[in-house]
Amino acid sequence: MLETISTNRAHGGTQSVYRHASTATGSEMTFSVYVPPHQPGQKLPVVWFLSGLSCTHANVTEKGEFRAACAALGLIFVAPDTSPRGESVPDDPAGAYDFGLSAGFYVDATEPPFARQYRMWTYVTEELPALIFAHFPADPAMQSIMGHSMGGHGALTIGLTFPERFRAISAFAPIVAPSQVPWGEKALGGYLGGDRETWRRHDAVALIEDGARAEAILVDQGLADPFLEQQLRPELLEAACASAGITLTLTRRPHYDHSYYFISTFMTDHLRWHAKRLDKSLNAAPA
């Protein structure tokens, strides 16, 4: 059962926030949904947005500036939380921002004490979609996925794992190769254990090396991003896509950083790119 936390009118559509008891995480989970103006009985494409480290559903909902574009393009926009929440949910003992609460990394943990509740892969790919398709006018045949930073990692790995489900994949400043950077090594090691082979299905570059494919990927990266060289390393995705023959549009943006000022600036570009792939009638030749 969904509990409505808030509902607001925006650009002729409805922006809502909901809470529910998750069986995947064994906790209450919160997510937001924007439903654009539509006709009764009409099914709409849905774009999933996965947020980054230290975020909740609220960051993109409040600062992403996606509603005008979604209203114009007829896109449902869904933003889940980034980890389970509640008193029973274990956190990083040191309270670090890059592990534990707000940092679920979109994996199903196998290591104690996280294995019981840190099951964000199952939540995002199974449980939440079932809720969305049951309660909202979303078409399961028209889905795409995008994200930011840790959520960009999630969007890439989920999109590459389920290419038949997601017609488009895009990301802002994604962690493209978590097995090769400090954020990812900490998270994957802590959640999945020390066998690095088990990490590969949650590493976009490794997935591509192991045969995963997508028709096209769109990435925007700010060149003033303080995490660019150590944590994000888009050149690794660029090389992997080139070797695999995947069309990657990687745009490096001078002066832009890692913030939602950056994301909101190019959000409409991304949503237009998604819309063209979700509904081919919008443009016979996708941009």
Image: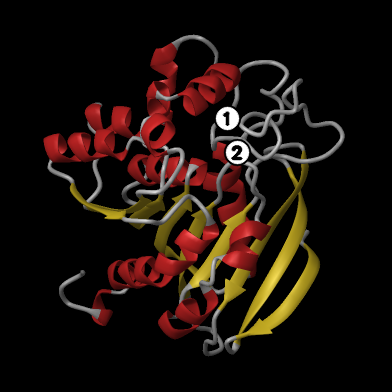
Give the answer, above or below, for where 150 lies relative to 62: above
Q: Crowdedness of circle 1 by 10 Å Cα count: few (<14), some, many (20+)?
A: many
Q: In which quarter of the image is the N terminus?
A: bottom right
Q: Which residue is drawn at 68% across and 84% down?
A: 9
**Residue 67 x/y as whole percent:** 54, 77
Marker disc for residue 108: 1
Q: Quadrant of residue 242?
A: top left
The residues bearing labels 1 and 2 have C-alpha atoms spaced at a distance of 6 Å
**Residue 4 x/y as whole percent:** 79, 67
Which residue occupies the extreme top position in the image?
A: 194
Marker disc for residue 120: 2
**Residue 146 x/y as whole percent:** 43, 55
Give amino acid for label 1: Asp
Looking at marks 1 and 2 on the same chain, the residue that comes earlier in the sequence is marked by: 1
Give amino acid for label 2: Met
Tell whether label 2 touches label 1 (CB within 8 Å).
yes
